[in-house]
Amino acid sequence: MSDSTQYKILLAAEESEVSCKAISYAFDLCSRFNTPYSLEIAYVIALNPETNVPFLHNLDKANNLDILMDADKPVSKVMERLKQCKSNYPNVQYNFNKLEGHGVVGKILKDYVDNHKPDLNLLIVGSRDLDGLQKVNYFQK
């Protein structure tokens, strides 16, 4: 079956309890599909924007390395949740993707969807940091 006939789902995940519930929801939803689907789980790592200011450029690089190393623990928590869901829903297939970008998480996710998922059918976001109105503002063009 061609890729264009799949129902395409992207779940933006993080280590929060709200996100864990969203992961469970996505697995349960996909387990009920009678049609082909693709489920991508994305963990977004927001790096500091690069600067051209002397001396600060090296500091930004060092901070970004710290951000990347600090992301290992939350990514491991998400991966553990994915393993739990996979054991409960063994027929559900998914792909996991770490997205790295400069700026805020919402903008990085929006740019990813715009540039790589133009035919996305469903975006699931489980987040602890933003209220609904802030989330909507990130995804407006």
Image (tube, helix red, strand yellow):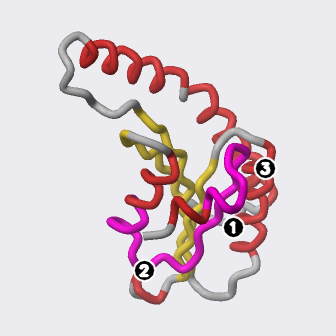
Inspect the image, locate mark 2, and give the three-letter code of the amino acid beneath it.
Answer: Asp
Q: Which SS class for mark 3?
A: helix
Give residue 81's position: percent from left, percent from top.
Answer: 73, 44
Q: What residue is pinned by disc 1?
A: 91
Q: Residue at x 50, y 46 (%)?
A: 105
> x, y percentage for residue 128?
73, 45
Residue 132 vs residue 88, the one in the foreground:
132
Question: Position of 108 compared to 96: left or right?
Answer: left
Residue 80 against residue 20 in the figure, above or below: above
Q: Quadrant of residue 66?
A: top left
Q: Mark 3 points at which residue?
A: 18
Q: Residue 64 at x, y = what percent?
A: 39, 23
Q: What residue type is labelled 1?
A: Asn
Q: How far apart are marks 1 and 2 (CA)?
A: 24 Å
Question: Label 3 is placed on what type of residue?
Answer: Val
Whole-number angstrom distance, CA of label 3 to CA of label 2:
26 Å
**Magenta span has 124?**
yes
Q: In this picture, which residue range is highlighted in magenta?
A: 112-135
Which residue is under mark 2?
Answer: 119
